[in-house]
Image (tube, helix red, strand yellow):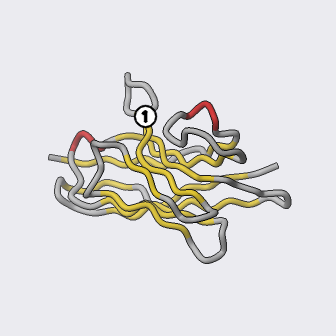
Amino acid sequence: QVQLVESGGGLVQAGGSLRLSCAASGRTFRSYAMGWFRQAPGKEREFVAAITWSYGGTYYADSVKGRFTVSRGDSRNTIYLQMNSLKPEDTAVYHCASRTYSGSVELPEGYEYWGQGTQVTVSS
C-alpha cells in the first residue's frame, strides 16, 4: 500500500507564494511520475504539474507556467510545488498523485495513488 501525504497549504494574499510538499511511503513504492492536481468547488479536477523520476522531466498546465515549479527531493519519495505570484483563481484543494507506468501525465486516470489534499486559498 502506498500513502501520499501533502502539506504546506494555507491562506495567502494574491501575489504571494506557497510551497507544497508531498511525501510518499510504502514498502513497494515505485513511481514513473508524480503529479499535482487541483479541484476548486464546483469544478472538475485539473492537472497542474508533473515530474518524472527517470530523467526529471517536468510538465505544466498553461495556467501555471512561469509561476509554479515542480521539483523532486533527493530521497526519490518526495516532490514539491513552489507556487509564486498566486492568484485568487488558484484557490483549490491540491492533491498529489503517483503513477507507476508511463503515459500522459496530464490525465488523472493514469494515477493509481492519491493524497487527501491540502487547501490553498488566495485572497484578493
- In x, y percent, where is residue 23? 62, 62
Q: Is residue 35 left or right of residue 43?
A: right
What residue is pinned by disc 1?
46
Q: Quadrant of residue 99?
A: top right
Above/below status of 66 relative to 102? below
- In x, y percent, where is residue 90? 29, 44
Q: Residue furthest bottom?
A: 74
- Which residue lies at the image location 61% right of the left edge and 30% below the top edge? 109
Tell which of 32 and 115 is nearer to you: 32
Looking at the image, how many numbered discs can be counted on the residues? 1
Q: Residue furthest right?
A: 27
Q: Is residue 26 left or right of residue 99?
A: right
Q: What secondary structure is found at the residue carrying circle 1?
A: strand
- In x, y percent, where is residue 11? 31, 54
Above/below status of 76 relative to 81? below
- Which residue lies at the image location 22% right of the left edge and 61% below the top edge? 16
Q: Quadrant of residue 73?
A: bottom right
Categorize mark 1 by other alpha carbons within 10 Å: few (<14), some (14-19), many (20+). Answer: some
